[in-house]
Image (cartoon, rainbow, N blue to C red):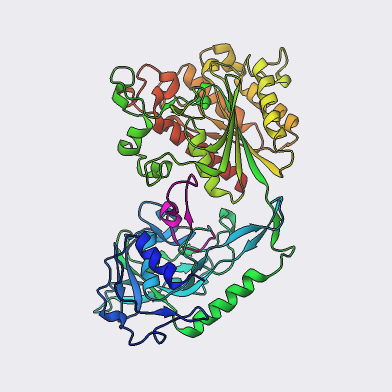
Amino acid sequence: MRSYFQFLLLLLITGVPFLTTVATSQTGNGVLSSDSIPNPTPLSQFALPELQGMSVNLEEWCVDVDAYICLKKGVLELIACTKASKEHESIVAVESTAKHIHTALLLLGAEAGSPARRKPVNDEKNAWMDVPPSGAPVDVFLVFDNEESAKPVEKPINEFITQEDGEIFSTNTFLFAGSILHSSDNNGPNHYMADKSGNVISISTFGDEVLCLPGLHSQVNTELYWNVAGDKLPDVGTPVILRLRPHTDSKYQTKLANDHASATSKRPTKETIRKVSTKVFILAGQSNMEGQGVVSMNHPEFYNGGKGNLEWSMKHSSSAEKMRHLKDDKKNWTSREDVQISFKSQEKQRKGNLTIGYTGYGGNSHIGPELQFGHVVGDYFDEPVLLIKTAWGGKSLHADFRPPSSGGRVGPYYTKMIKEIHAALEELKHVDYELAGFVWMQGWNDMVASDAITHYADHLVNLALDLRSELGKSQLPFIVGELGNGGPVQRDGNMTDFRQAQRSGAARIENAIFVETSAFARPKEESPNTTHGHHWFGNAESYFLIGDALARATIELFEN
C-alpha cells in the first residue's frame, strides 16, 4: 500500500500546495487514522487546495468533478474521460486533470492500489500472468438538474449503463487503481498516464485508468456489451457533476489490504498464464510509404515557411488535438517502447522505438504513415508490436514489384521486399510472434501508365496470393491504401481509373480492405512542398491521417 508519506509526495508532484498540519497518520495495518496523533485537526478546518475543475465536498464526503455529457448513444468502454480524448466511448468528459482527481481522493483518505497489469512468470518473459486491479472502493454518481425536482438529483452511474435487452449495469462501485507513472524515455520526468490516455473511469481494462472495475474486461469491440442509456441523460454538452464517494472507513481499508495481499500472492495457473505474442505488421510500397511528411523544416522559400509541417500541424491543423500524443510534457517527440520499428533504407538498417524519422531521408526530418499507424495499433493491442517497413520510391507493381503469379519477369523489388521481411522475422526466431497484417501504400508509377492501370487489379490479387504463400499465412490481413494524392477527383482520367483498379483488386482478395485516403489531401498553399503533389505536398497532417486510417482498417479486419 502507498504510505501517507507517498501521499504527501504526490501532492507536491501534482502541484497541490503542501498541507502545513498533518490531519491523519497511518496505523500499523496500513489504515489511515486520526486517532494515532494527539489532538488531530479536523480536515474541515483546513484551507483545502484548489484543484482544477472540481471541489472536495466535506459535507457529502466526496469529490465533485465538473463534467459534461458527451455521449447519448453508443457502446461504452469508459464512464469518464478527460476532455478532448475519448468522448466517442464515454458517458461524460471531465474538466479536471486525472491526476487532480487522484489527489482529491487521497485528500479524503482513499487508498490507491494499482491497475491491472501483467508480470513475467519466468526469466525469458515469454509467459506472463495477469494480475487484477486493486484499490479502495469508490461509489460513482451523476448529479444534474431535473425538471421534476427543485434541486439537483444524485443518481448512481449504473442507471445510465444498459444492455440491448434492457439489463442495467450491476454496480456503481469502482476501484481506485490510481493509474501509473511512466517516463517516455526512461530519463525524463514521469507522466501520470491517465492524463495521456484520457482514461479516468473505465469499464474495459486499459491498465492506466484512475478508477476501474474489479477483474479484467476486454477492449475488443465484439466483446463490448454495455451501452449508454441516453434516454435517461441530459443532452450532450449539458454540464453535470461527476460525484466520487470513496469508502474510507477502516473495515473497507482492512478488507482492501487482505484482498490485495491474497490476489498478488496467488501462484500462476493455466488460467492466468498466457504467451505474449508480438504483433507484426508489414508496411510496404513506394515513396509515400517511405514517408515524405516534413517534420520541422520551415525555410520561407523551400518549405513555404513551415506551413503544413508536423510542428505547424500540431498547432494549426484540424488534427491538432488528435496529435497531442506525439510530444511529451517537455515538448520532446514521444518514443514508444511497446512499438518497435525496423526499416532498411539506403542499405542501412534502422531499428528502435516508434518515433519520428523512420523514412528514406534518415535523421528526424520526415514522417510517413508508420508513425500514427504504430500509435493506434500500439494502443489497441496489449501485446508488443513490431512494424517492418520495406519501401522504395519510384517503383511500379506492373514491373518493379511484379509478383510471380503475374507471369513474366518477377519484379526485383518484390524479391527484395520478401528478403527484407524474412531478415526482420529471422531476428524474432526466439520470440513468439504473429503476423497480423500487410499494409500496401503504392501506385503513382502505375497510375501514370495506362497499360499498368489495366492490369493493376490482377497484379494486386497476385501480390496478396504470393505474399501469403511466401509467409505461410493464407488469411494474412491485406490492407490497401488509396492513392489519394490531390484529393477527390472530379473528372475521368488516369487517377479515377487507377483508384477504381485499386478498389476492385482489393474487393477480389479475401480478408482484405480498401482504405480511402483522398479526404486527407491538403492544399499546396498550406503545405511545405508546394510543387510535390505526388508526395501529398509533404503535408505532415496528410501522412498522420493516412496512418490513422490504415491502422483503424487493420483493426477492423482483425476484429472481423
The residue nearer to you, when weighing 227 against 219, is 219
Q: Residue at x 40, y 52 (%)?
A: 85
Q: Is residue 200 above or below residue 28?
A: above
Query: What span is in magenta?
Result: 181-206
Q: Position of residue 343 (x, y in %)?
A: 58, 28
Q: Is residue 238 left or right of residue 166?
A: left
Q: Is residue 90 above or below residue 432?
A: below
The residue nearer to you, when weighing 454 against 433, is 433
The residue nearer to you, when weighing 510 against 353, is 353
Q: Position of residue 248 (x, y in %)?
A: 44, 80
Whether residue 205 is in magenta: the answer is: yes
Q: Position of residue 443 (x, y in %)?
A: 54, 21
Whether residue 504 is in magenta: the answer is: no
Q: Is residue 427 above or below residue 24?
A: above
Q: Is residue 515 left or right of residue 529?
A: right
Q: Position of residue 153 (x, y in %)?
A: 32, 77
The residue nearer to you, when weighing 75 against 470, is 470
